[in-house]
Amino acid sequence: MMQASPRPNGLRFLENLAYLVPGYHAYRQPALRREEDSRLRARVNEQIRQMLELLEAVHNHWHPHGSAAHLDELDRQRLRLMTISTAVRQGPYDHWSFFETNALREGTIERILEADLLILQDLEESLEHVGAGQSIGSARTAGVFLRDLTDKLDQLEQHLIMRERVLASV
């Protein structure tokens, strides 16, 4: 039986990411980078929009019986998501070197793709979490829900910042 030749871990990582993140090849080509970055930002904003709709439904579910403090915190998190969305929509177009550099180092592409995957994972987990908010009936579980939501949005912001720093470092 023939065995495949072993590949360096970094190469295997990149190959796996190429399948998971459609923009892998686009990041390698300067002419396509801006388009791929825009596509990712649109996807992030679409998922944030879905989260905002779900948070509105959670607010409506909680409103008749929820505490004022929990409703206020829910509104703060909605405003926070809107702020994140605005920042993502505006994009880092002052990072011209990322979009214009002919060849990015493999390590840079790895870091960008890692950030992209983490962001998409954060969004998926946050959407799932927010969707569960409509089934919350007690003040105690509402408090836990809001703390977990805050943690998830903190993580999303950290990964978005990580991505922006990679783009700025090119």
Image (cartoon, helix red, strand yellow):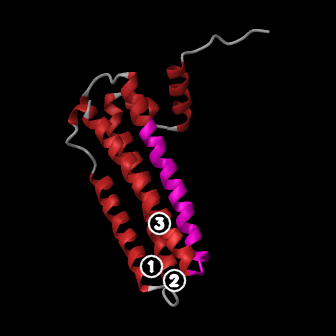
What kind of residue is marked 1? Answer: His
Residue linked to disc 3: 147
Dot 2 surroundings within 10 Å: few (below 14), some, or many (20 or more)?
many
Q: Residues within 10 Å of mark 1 (few under 14, many from 20)?
A: some
Q: What's drawn in magenta, residue-wise?
A: 114-138
Sequence-wise, the earlier of marks 3 and 1 is 1
Mark closer to the chain start, 2 or 3 = 2
Residue 62, labelled with which disc?
2
Q: Residue at x 54, y 16 (%)?
A: 8
Q: Is residue 114 left or right of residue 101?
A: right
Image location (x, y in percent) of residue 149: 47, 64
The C terminus lies in which quarter of the figure? top left
Q: Residue 50 — which label?
A: none
Reply above or below: 24 against 157.
above
Q: In the image, what residue type sits under mark 3?
A: Arg
Q: Is residue 111 magenta?
A: no
For image coordinates 35% across by 42% down, the residue present is: 162
Task: Answer left or right for 84 relative to 20.
Answer: left
